[in-house]
Image: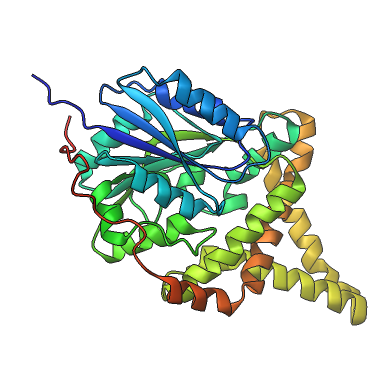
Amino acid sequence: MPTQQPAVSVIMPVLNEERHLRDSVRHILAQDYAGEMEVVIALGPSTDRTDEIAAELVRETASDARARVHTVPNPTGRTPAALNAAIKASRHPIVVRVDGHGMLSPNYIANAVRLLEETGAQNVGGIMHAEGENAWEDAVAAAMTSKIGVGNAAFHTGGQAGPADTVYLGVFRREALEQQGGYNEEFIRAQDWELNFRIREAGGLIWFSPELKVQYRPRPSVKALAKQYKDYGRWRHVVARYHRGSINLRYLAPPAAVCAIAAGLVLGAAVTPWAFAVPAGYLAAITAGSVPAGKGLPLKARAQIPVALATMHMSWGFGFLTSPRSLAAKVIASRRPAVQADPAAGRADVRQ
């Protein structure tokens, strides 16, 4: 007789997600998973219909004994605060993070629970499978899943299953989250990387598997993409200052490119036109790199891939270079457990 599958808590930080929230929750509730599930949505101060849609989802699942939706407030609007609030309000031994614009593949939770048991990992995750709904988003998705866009990050580009520094979103053992005190709420971005670093430092295993796939909706404009990647760079530098030795050459490539291009433009204008070869070479490289990245896409989308690549590289690099040291000091001063063990919470074994 098979062992009953453990109950799962799905936590969702949401802010202005009226476009995708219902679809995202629908993909969770449709999971091919026999265990009990709950969905905890942490609501930030949205200015669209997100709260109304969340309330509808709560009402629609109120009589479902297997998978109910409920909400908790997140007045700060910050993602790590939302995640911690949802963790505190949840009760099951497996915690699955899903964003309001992420769509789980049908067997995502079942496969993740199996991998936790097979590998002994504290957190497992897979591929951030970016897919657009128009030409610009298709271009961003192509850039985000190409090596010229994001380097060799397996959760963007795919790869072999195995230990990893970090994974996209994550499916955690609750005790790992409680041991680390949850997410550090000062990390507005890069909170996943920072938490996974602490789990690894404590001896825990982070496991990547291409079996786990989450459909991701890219930012809908150049401005939104630039802000996203500037924040990524800014907060990745904070992680590097807070956790010495956590940086590698992949993270230094965008700021190096920003410096080289800026120097080339200045020297080209003031000293010698030959210096313009540096920015020209960069433009040639991303244009050439966009050809394989855009294979199979319509011409309108392919033409925008170099714009997406340049936006990602330059914004990330600029954010990294301009990240103030005061942020790291603030992070260090604020560190305290945000999630603690609840003796009343359920603790089923992670076995099938």
Q: Position of residue 158 (x, y in %)?
A: 46, 42
Residue sitting at x 47%, y 21%: 59
Residue 48, image x and y in percent?
68, 36
- Figure check: 241 above or below 67: below
Image vertical order of residue 34 relative to residue 241, above or below: above
Residue 287 visible, this orientation: no
Q: Is residue 316 above or below residue 55?
A: below
- The residue most toward the bottom is 271
> Can you see residue 216?
yes
Q: Is residue 169 left or right of residue 279?
A: left
Q: How is the image coloured?
A: rainbow
Q: Is residue 55 above or below residue 15?
A: above
Q: Nearer the viewer, residue 116 or 172?
A: 172
Q: Quadrant of residue 325?
A: bottom right
Quadrant occupied by the C terminus: top left
Residue at screen point 88% across, 75% down: 268
Indicate left or right for 1 with 220 as reference.
left
How many numbered discs? 0
Name the residue located 71 percent from the left edge and 68 percent from the top edge. Answer: 258
Q: Quadrant of the N terminus?
A: top left
**Which residue occupies 62% across, 72% down?**
323
Q: Position of residue 135 (x, y in %)?
A: 74, 32
Determine whether, in the image, residue 167 is placed left or right of residue 347: right
Q: Quadrant location of residue 285?
A: bottom right
Q: Nearer the viewer, residue 61 or 259?
A: 61
